[in-house]
Image (cartoon, grey):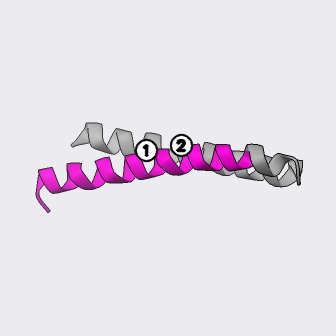
Amino acid sequence: MERHEAEHLLKHWIEHNESHSRSFRDRAKQINDISPEAAKAIEEAASLMDRCTECLKRAMDAL
């Protein structure tokens, strides 16, 4: 794999994760009325997604 291909892939993954994280948080707010427990779990998933994104950003910096 070429460096520019790896950069493109990482950029895509980072943007994709950030989009999912935002979506999770938006949906958690909506679901909170139905089940605060479910909303909390979705918020946790968003936080984990953010941690994954930080790992991908470190990988990008290491290229």
On whether residue 40 falls in the magenta region, the answer is: no
Q: Would residue 52 appear left or right of 33 to someone viewing this image? A: left
- Is residue 4 rendered magenta in the image? yes
Mark 1: few, some, or many residues within 10 Å (few <14, many ≥20)? few
Q: Name the kind of residue labelled 1 in the image.
A: Cys
Q: Nearer the viewer, residue 23 or 52?
A: 23
The residue sitting at 39% across, 47% down in the picture is: 14
Q: Which residues are magenta?
A: 1-28
Q: Secondary structure at mark 1?
A: helix
**Amino acid found under the numbered disc labelled 2:** Arg
Residue behind mark 2: 51
**Image quadrant for the C terminus?**
top left
Can residue 52 be seen here? The reply is: yes
Q: Which mark is residue 55?
A: 1
**Circles 1 and 2: CB distance less than 8 Å?**
yes
Foreground: 59 or 4?
A: 4
Residue drawn at x 16%, y 56% as measured from the top left? 5
Across and down, in percent, residue 16 comes to 42, 52
| Residue 28 screen position, x and y as percent | 73, 47
Mark number for residue 34? none
x and y percent of residue 31 in the render?
A: 80, 52
Q: How busy is the neighbourhood of tag 2: few (under 14 within 10 Å), some, or many (20 plus)?
A: few
Disc 1 to disc 2, how far (Cα)?
6 Å
> Where 6 sits versus 50, above or below?
below
